[in-house]
Each structure stands twice: as structure tokens, then as C-alpha cells.
Image (cartoon, helix red, strand yellow):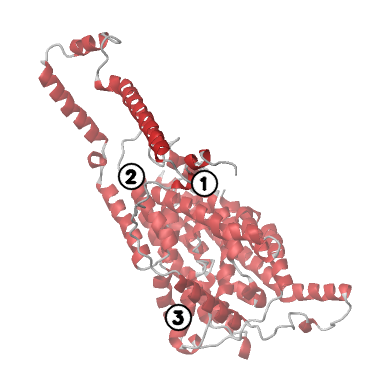
Amino acid sequence: MMLLNMSLQVDQVGEGYVILLTGLLIVFSALLILSLFFQFGLPLMLYVYRIITKGRDKKIKDIPMSADENFTGEVAAAISTAIHLYLNEQHDDENAVLTIKQARKLYSPWSSKIYGTHQKLK
Amino acid sequence: MVLKPIDTSLILAKKHKMKKILLIFGVLSLLIFIRPALGFSSDANPKDGITTVEAQPNVDQGDGVFTNAVHGIEQFYNYTGFANATWGHIIMILIGIVFIYLGIKFDYEPLLLIPIGIGVIIGNIPFVAGNQTGIYETGSVLNYLYFGVVKGVYPPLIFLGIGAMTDFSSLIANPKLMLLGAAAQIGVFGTFLGALYLGFSLPEAGAIGIIGGADGPTAIFLSSKLANGINILPDGTTVKNLIGPIAIAAYSYMALVPVIQPPIMRLLVNKEDRKIRMKPPRAVTQKEKMIFPVVALLLTTFISPSALPLLGMLFFGNLLKESGRTERLADTARTKLIDIVTILLGVTVGASTQADIFITKDSMLIFTLGAVSFVIATMGGLLFAKFMNLFLKGDNKINPLIGASGVSAVPDSARVVHAEALKSDPHNYLLMHAMAPNVSGVIGSAIAAGILLSFLA
């Protein structure tokens, strides 16, 4: 039984190595394919798309976002940090103690029917 | 308009009469309803009195009532938590309180630690089994809520929200950083191997390994498929139920990213490398952002179809965000929906740590393995970033620190990288760059989960 257990475990570890290697390979290849696509495939696709729709802008490097080149990630980060800080400040620590304050209004005529019954047409 | 005083007084008098009548009726009906409880059964059930006398013929009445009362209190006591508490329960309740304390005092992932902490307390209130109270008793309310964890319903919904929150533009701008997300997955497979050596069966080891992905929802999803206490192993035994310990380990290590990662970063990356400045990522067009979720969904799920529930929802959420036409749906997904699911997930995962099931040797091993896997994953990312730098020149060099954010823990590990870089150079802002491997780490660990699932399920 012990021997069987041992051999079972060795088998498992062997299979573990197979899964380790293939798994890593697959993860890497999946993300590699994805990155290759976005490095080369997408610009090409957008380039083809441009040709089909307009027939201008022949250079690939011209395609991505020539309009607002100055708007870099750093600018975006600065803006979003500012917004984040601002929104954080808006909500300061509020008093967590809740009290119920009774409104001292025992009688209010706002919906009293009695007024309605005594209206006369003029 | 003029009011005659006599009219009002008449009306008021009428009102008082009505009140009196209502009061009398109320008291009467109350008396009728509670009559049986007070024992005024008079002639309706004359046998009742006789039977009680028959039941205890030898004890005189005063003594009987007293012993009965003591007996009743005793029985009641046996049902209370005080009688059923074990040391395990008390330890777990203390752990729950520590979680809540950490969440409130140090702001460590309070959105997770507070629901989980209170869940741990809920799950460890001692009770008498058999009354459909506990989370593991079929038919109890907690059991129904736990269904979403056991069947892996909550994780894809969380991923939907994450997708609707995530901006993949830094990744699209610099696709090579995607490889860092893959490199950190070495933590998953390394831990998987470690768990095998420690004697866990293959599916259990797979579920434990995914802690290295540093992604709570993925860990819950995979453990609910592989180590759920239902599946039968090839040798005929049932697989262990490890969902609770794995989820707790994954979430607590995610919360501890700011503690675990910085020392490893300082150990593996020298001071010069830490100061490397990366050029700002280019701006990405909206068209690219819209294409990304569709293409990424197709590519990744064709390679690893088992990860479909996770990746499908992730990219669906992202498309909702980027399409520009479904802002309402995206808004719900990233705010209300993810909040609701987080509440349910947190509290049920916490409650699943019932002491008699949770405090075992296996849980301790899982916690140790989880810590090791986090370290391996971080090291994998850092070393691969250094390796990539060998091939990159001048402006394109990457700061090796961002490799550490290849473990998914979004966005905590990116924040940690950013803070660490600021320590060596107060003007080196790495947050945007670190987000790229960070989100690709999410994709990577989902793919890894899919691979493990297809091999081991």
C-alpha cells in the first residue's frame, strides 16, 4: 500500500511537471500572440481600414492618434489624480451618531378636511 | 376663510369617541388572542390540566414547576453559543475581529476584509447542528447564498465589473508588457508543483496553485471547480473541500501586497535599475480600445476555452465600457452589480471558515503555500522584466519594478510599484506603466486557471 502510494505520488509529480511546462508555454504563447497582434496586426488592420475608407495616410506610423499627441499617459494620470483627490476631499468623515429629533407639530391644518367642508361658492 | 369654534370641538369629540372604541376593541382582541398563552383555557380544553397532572403524579406542584423551569433553562443553555463553543470557534472569531480591525484601522482592502471579517464571525457562532443554521447545512439561508461560491457564479460577475472598470490603454500602447503578466504566472505553476510534493492530489494542487495568480475571484472559481468536496478522484476518494481556505488565503495575501512585495523588489532590483524612467505611453485611439476586448476575447478563449466564464465576462464588461453606447450597463456593472456580488461573496466566503471544517493541517499548509506562491510570482515578474531589458535598448528599456505588478491584484500591486519607484526617484511615476502588466496578469491568471481546469477537471 505504501509503495502504491509512493508510486502514485511520483506519477502525480511527473504529471505535475508536464502541466507546469505546458501550462507556462500556453500562457506565454497566448499573451505573446495577443501582444504581437496589438504590436503589428492592429496597426496593419487600421491601415487597411484607412485605405478602404479614405485612401489617404499611407504611413503606418501616422495612423495612431496624430490629433492629440500631447495628451500622454502622464497628463491623464495627473488629471485623474487631481479628480481623485478632489472627490476624496468632498466626502470627509461624518459624524456617525444618529439622533432623531422630534418635530413639535401636534396639529397642522395642511390636509385638514374641515377647511374643505366649509368652503362656499362665492 | 372663517372657522367656527363649535364645529371643531364637535369633530374633536367624535374623534375621541372613535379612539375609545378602537382602544376597547384592541384590548379585547388582544385578550382573546393571548388567552391560550396565559392559560385561560377555561372550558375550551378541559383535558389539558388533567394531562399535566398525569405526567408528573409523584412530584408536588411547586417543586415540579421549579424543576421544569431549571430543566428548561438548562435545555436553552445547551442551545446557546456558550455551551457549544470550542477553542476553534473562539480563535476564528478573534481572527474575524482582526480582519475587521485591519480593514478599518489600516485601510487594507476594507471592501474585502470587512465583509470577510464579519463573515468569519457569522460562520463561527457555535450552534446546534440540524436546525438549518450553518452555511454547510443544506437548506439554510447562508447555504443558498454560498451556492454562488460553490458553483462559481460570483467570480464571473466580479470579472464583469472589473472589465467595466479597467482601462486597457496602457497595455495597447505597449503590448510587450503583456509578457510580464505571463511571467508572473510561474507562481501559479510553481505552487502547484509544491502542493503536489506536499501530498495534495492533482486537482487540489491546481486549486491551491492559483493563489499565486493573486486574483481572488479566479481562485474561488477554480477551487469551486477542482477542490469542491464533490468531485471523485481516480483512486475512488472524494476531493477535499478547500474553497474556504483558498479564498481566504488569496484575499488576505491580496490585501497584504503592500507588505509582501517591496522587500522582494529591493532584493532583486538594484538602485540604478529602480531609477529607470520609461517614456510615456502613447495615446490610444478609441477604435483600438473597442477592438481590444473583442480580439482579446477571441484569441484567449480559443487558446484556453475553459477560462471562458471569466475571460468572457471580463472582456464583455470592457466592451460595455469602451463601446461608448452602453454607458448605463457599464456603470451598473462597475458600481452596483460588483458591490452586490462583493457583499455576498465576502460574507459567505468568510462564513465558510466554520472552525470544525477550517482549522485543519491542510489550511495551514495552504496558507504557507499561498505566501510562497506570492513570492515566486513576484520574483518571476521581476526577473523576467530584467531579462527583457537585456534585449531592449535606450529609450525602450523598462523599469524592472513593474514586473512585480504582473501578479494580478489589481490595482494594488501597480500602486505598490509606483510607491516603490517614488522612493528611489521622487519624479519617476510608474503607475500607468505598471497598470499594463497588472491587467495582463488578470488575463494571464484567468488563462492559467483555464489550463489547469482543462487538465485536471
Query: Callout 1: 10 Å neighbours few (<14), some, many (20+)?
Result: some
Sequence order check: which comes first, mark 2 or mark 1? 1
Q: Is residue B372 left or right of residue B169?
A: left
The label on residue B363 is: none
Residue depth check, mark 2 versus mark 3: number of the one nearer the observer: 3
- Relative image position of residue B179 (x, y in whole percent): 61, 72
Q: Is residue B211 left or right of residue A40?
A: left
Asked if residue B4 is positioned above or below residue A19 in the image, the reply reads above
Q: Chain of mark 2?
A: B
**Residue B138 can be seen in this image:** yes
Q: CA distance from mark 1 to mark 3?
A: 38 Å
**Residue B237 can be seen in this image:** no
Q: Chain of mark 1?
A: B
Give amino acid for label 2: Asp
- Relative image position of residue B358 (x, y in whole percent): 36, 49
Q: Residue at x 33, y 56 (%)?
A: A99
**Element marked by disc 2:** helix
Q: Quadrant of residue B283?
A: bottom right
Q: Which residue is mark 2?
A: B356
Query: Callout 2: 10 Å neighbours few (<14), some, many (20+)?
Result: few
- Relative image position of residue B357 (x, y in whole percent): 36, 45
**Element marked by disc 3:** helix
Q: Which residue is mark 3?
A: B420
Q: Residue at x 25, y 45 (%)?
A: B86
Q: Which residue is mark 1?
A: B148
